[in-house]
Amino acid sequence: MVNYRALADIFDETFIALSSFDLDKLHALEQRIVALAESNAGLESNEIESVLLKKQRLEIILQNCQLNLDALSRLHVRNMRNQWAQ
């Protein structure tokens, strides 16, 4: 069985790394989660709900990040067009 605490810690550390834009930490966390996934171990049933809530929270944060990045990209494109029009 996967150590619930290890998985929960990875999610918690991911939230912190995202909020501080720590790309090195995010890369290291990605490697840890890949290694954990490759172990093919499961969670005990009493731990699944808590981990799924953290996963859902992370998905919402990532969706919001993507929306914000898309908005910034549109603003950048609009700004570049306005600079050339002047």
Image (cartoon, rainbow, N blue to C red):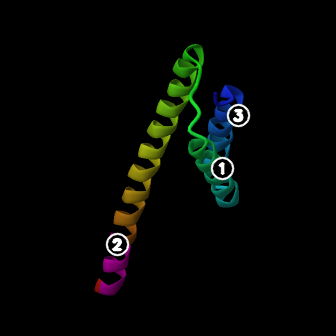
Image location (x, y in percent) of residue 64? 43, 44
Q: Which residue in the structure is indicated by mark 3? A: 6
Using a 10 Å C-alpha cutoff, classify the residue at mark 3 as few (fewer than 14 neighbours), some (14 to 19) or many (20 or more). few
Q: Are marks 3 and 1 in contact (CB under 8 Å)?
A: no
Position of residue 10 relative to residue 24, above or below, is above
User: What is the chief secondary structure element of the magenta stretch?
Assistant: helix
Give the mark, 3 or 1, whose residue is nearer the N terminus: 3
Would you say residue 86 is visible in this rendering? no
Residue annotated with mark 1: 29
Q: Which residues are magenta?
A: 78-84
Residue at which label 2 appears:
77
In front: 59, or 6? 6
In reply to whether residue 82 is colored magenta, the answer given is yes
Q: Residue 70: name its quadrant.
A: bottom left
Which secondary structure, mark 3? helix
Q: Is residue 21 above or below residue 16?
A: below
Residue at the far top: name it.
46
Where does residue 75 sit, x and y in percent of width and height? Answer: 37, 65
